[in-house]
C-alpha cells in the first residue's frame, strides 16, 4: 500500500491534534461510505433532467483557484499508481469538462452567507431572486456538488449557529434540485490561535450536518494531517501546491502538497459516488 494511503488509514484510527470534543467526529474516513439516501437524491435528479456526468463546485478561494481540479481537466493529470481513477476522470469529461469549469457558486473571500445571497449572483446571468448556488445549479444541471465552505466563516467570526443554518440551507437547496451534496471538512488555519480553534468548531458542524442528511462527507482535514505543515502554504490559510502549480501530479512527491491531496481525494470521492450510487 502506498505511504500516503497508509498514513490516512493510520490517522483515522488514532487521536489527532484537535480538541477533545472534535476528536470523535474527526474519525470519519477521508472517503465516505454511502447511504441509500445518496442514490435516492441521484435518481430524483435524473427525473429532473440533471446531467449524470457533471459536478459543480461550491466554496471560496480554496475552490475557485485553478489548483483545485483544473489541472485534471486540461492535461495536467499524472495518476502514477492511481490508474484505477482514470474511468471516473473519463466519465466527468464525457459531455462537459467539470474539472476545468469554474462557475458561479465559488468566489474568493466568500462565507456560507455569500453562497446564499442573491446580491452575490451576477445580474447578467441569474434571475433577480436567484442566489449563486441556485443559479449555478439551474445553468449546470449537475448530479453532484462538491462543497467546501467555512474557512472565511472561521476567520470572520460568523457565529456557529448561523453557519450551521447556512450550511443546512446549502445542503437542502442541493437536495431539492436533485443534486448530491458532498460536504468537505476545511483545512487547518494558522492565522491566529482563535481561528485555528474555530476550524475545529466549523468542521464539527460540517460532519454533524453530513450525518443529519445522510450525505457524503469528504474528510479533507484528516487527509492533510500527515503532510508538512498539515498541507498549508506559507500564507497560513490555503493548501500548499508545487512550485510549478502542477496540482494534478499524484506521485509521492506531488502528494506532499495540500492541493494535490485535495485533488486525489476529490477524485476518490467522485469515484465512490459514481460507482456506489450512479448506476
Image (spheres, grey):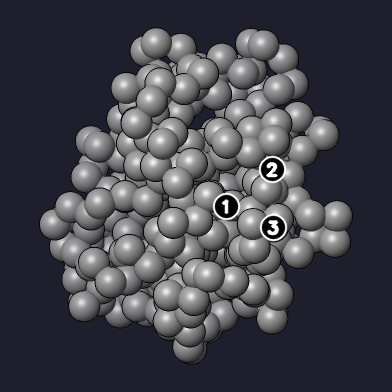
Mark with earlier residue (2, 1): 2
Mark with earlier residue (2, 3): 2
The answer to which of 193 and 167 lies nearer the viewer is 193
Residue occupying the point 75% across, 29% down: 236
Q: Is residue 164 above or below residue 239?
A: above
Left/right of residue 2 with respect to residue 76 in the rendered view:
left
Residue occupying the point 54% across, 60% down: 264
Which residue position is annotated with label 3?
254
Q: Residues within 10 Å of mark 3 (few under 14, many from 20)?
A: some
Mark 3 in CB contact with mark 1 (< 8 angstroms): no
Tag 1's secondary structure?
helix
Mark 2 in CB contact with mark 1 (< 8 angstroms): yes
Total label count? 3
Residue 148 location (% of width, % of height):
52, 45
Disc 2 versus disc 3: nearer the observer: 3
Q: Where's the C terminus, which quadrant?
A: bottom left
Which residue position is annotated with label 2?
239
Residue occupying the point 64% across, 33% down: 230
Quadrant in the rendering for residue 198: top right
Residue 48 location (% of width, % of height):
26, 74
Mark with earlier residue (3, 1): 3
Q: Where's the N terminus, which quadrant?
A: bottom left
Amino acid at each position: 500500500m502506498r505511504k500516503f494511503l497508509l498514513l490516512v488509514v493510520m490517522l483515522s484510527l488514532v487521536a489527532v491534534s484537535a480538541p477533545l470534543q472534535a476528536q470523535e467526529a474527526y474519525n470519519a474516513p477521508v472517503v465516505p461510505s454511502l447511504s441509500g439516501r445518496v442514490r435516492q437524491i441521484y435518481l430524483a435528479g435524473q427525473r429532473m433532467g440533471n446531467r449524470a456526468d457533471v459536478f459543480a463546485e461550491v466554496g471560496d478561494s480554496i475552490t475557485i483557484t485553478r489548483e483545485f481540479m483544473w489541472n485534471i481537466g486540461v492535461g495536467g493529470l499524472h495518476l502514477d499508481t492511481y490508474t484505477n481513477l482514470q474511468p471516473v476522470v473519463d466519465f466527468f469529461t464525457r459531455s462537459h469538462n467539470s474539472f476545468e469549469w469554474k462557475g458561479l457558486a465559488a468566489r474568493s473571500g466568500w462565507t456560507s452567507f455569500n453562497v446564499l445571497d442573491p446580491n452575490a449572483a451576477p445580474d447578467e446571468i441569474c434571475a433577480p431572486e436567484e442566489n449563486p448556488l441556485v443559479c449555478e445549479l439551474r445553468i449546470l444541471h449537475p448530479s453532484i456538488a462538491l462543497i467546501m465552505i467555512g474557512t472565511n466563516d472561521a476567520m470572520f467570526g460568523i457565529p456557529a449557529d448561523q453557519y450551521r443554518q447556512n450550511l443546512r440551507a446549502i445542503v437542502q437547496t442541493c437536495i431539492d434540485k436533485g443534486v448530491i451534496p458532498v460536504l468537505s471538512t476545511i483545512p487547518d488555519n494558522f492565522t491566529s490561535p482563535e481561528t485555528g480553534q474555530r476550524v475545529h468548531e466549523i468542521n464539527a458542524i460540517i460532519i454533524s450536518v453530513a450525518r443529519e442528511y445522510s450525505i457524503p462527507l469528504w474528510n479533507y482535514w484528516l487527509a492533510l494531517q500527515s503532510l508538512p505543515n498539515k498541507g498549508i502554504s506559507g500564507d497560513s490559510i490555503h493548501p500548499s501546491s508545487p512550485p510549478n502549480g502542477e496540482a494534478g501530479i499524484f506521485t509521492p512527491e506531488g502528494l506532499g502538497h495540500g492541493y494535490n491531496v485535495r485533488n486525489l481525494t476529490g477524485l476518490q470521492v467522485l469515484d465512490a459516488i459514481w460507482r456506489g450510487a450512479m448506476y
